[in-house]
Amino acid sequence: MSTTITTPRTPVQDPLDLVARTRSHTSFQETVSQTLTMAWRATKKMRRNPEQFFDVIIQPLLFTAMFTYIFGGAISGSVANYMPLIIPGILAQTALTACMAMGTQLREDMDKGVFDRFKSLPIARIAPLAGPALADVIRYVIAATLTILVGLAMGYRPGGGFLGTLGGWALTIVAAWSLAWIFTWLGTIARSAQAVQGISMMIMFPLSFMSNAFVKEDTMPGWLQAFVKVNPVSHVVSAVRDLMNDGQVTGDVGWALLGCVLVVAIFAPLSVRSYKRHL
C-alpha cells in the first residue's frame, strides 16, 4: 500500500485585501508624498483642460462689475461707498463657487474608472482626495486675486493697507479650501456628476445669497438675520471686511478660522469613509 501525504493549503488571500492592509500602514511622510503626487497629476490635468479656469477668470470680472454698478447706488448711495461692503462679499462668493467644482470633477473621475486604478495601489486612501483638493488651491488663488485687482481698478481702496488685503486674500483661500471638502464628500456619495452639480447649487445659493455678502444683515427680516448670523459664509465675509477695510484681527477672524477647521475635521473623514466604500 502506498501512503499519500497531503500538506495543508495556505488560503489564497484576495490581492485587494493585501493592498488595503498595506495602505493601512502608510506612514505620514508617505501620505504627504502620495498626496503631492496626486496634486501634481491634478495640476497636469488642469493644464491640459484650460476650460477649468473659465469660471475663476470670468466670474470675478463679471460679478464684481455687475453687482457693484447695479446695486451700489441703491444700497450705499454710490459705487464708491458700496465697494468696502461688496468686494469682500464677492471674494467669499467667488471662492464658494470655485470650490463647488471640486465634487463634480471628482465624481467624473470616479465614473471614468480612474479611481479603480488607485484602489490597486498601496497608497493612503486620503491621497486621491487630498491631492486634487490641494491642486485646486491654484484656482482659488486666481479667483481671489482677480477679484481684488478688479476692485482696485474700479476705485476700491482697502483701509487695511497691503497687510490687511493680504490677510483677507489668504483667509478667502483657506475658506475655499475647507469648504471644498463638503463638495468632495458630495462627489463620493452622489451617483453622477450631474447630481453633484445640482446638489452643490442648492447648497451654494443659500450660503452665498442668504448671507451678509451683498447687504448688511440689519436690513433683513428677523428670521433671515437668524440664519445669516450662523451662516459660515457670513463669518468669512465679516472677517475679510475687518482685515481689508480696517486692518484688524477681530473675533470674526477667529470664528472664521475655527469654522474652517471644523468643516475639514468633519467632512474630510466623511469623504475618506465614503470613498473607501467604493473600493
Image (cartoon, rainbow, N blue to C red):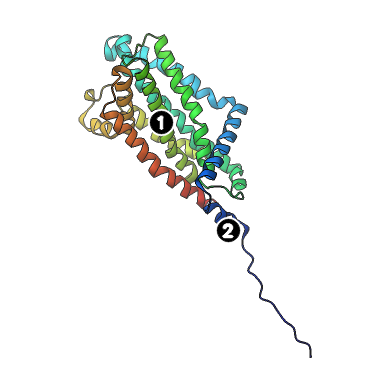
Secondary structure at numbered mark 1: helix
Q: How many marks?
A: 2
Rendered position, 182 above or below 213: below
Query: Horizontally, is 249 left or right of 110 in the view?
Result: left
Q: Nearer the viewer, residue 30 or 132?
A: 30
Q: Residues within 10 Å of mark 1 (few under 14, many from 20)?
A: many
For the point 58% across and 58% down, the residue is 17
> Mark 2 to mark 1: distance in Å?
36 Å
Inspect the image, locate mark 2, and give the three-letter code of the amino acid beneath it: Asp
Residue 74 numbered tag: none
Q: Residues within 10 Å of mark 2 (few under 14, many from 20)?
A: few
Across and down, in percent, residue 64 comes to 40, 16
Across and down, in percent, residue 98 comes to 46, 28
Rendered position, 115 above or below 87: below
Residue 174 numbered tag: 1
Residue 60 falls in image quadrant: top left
Q: Quadrant of the N terminus?
A: bottom right
Instruction: Report the residue marked by disc 2.
Output: 17
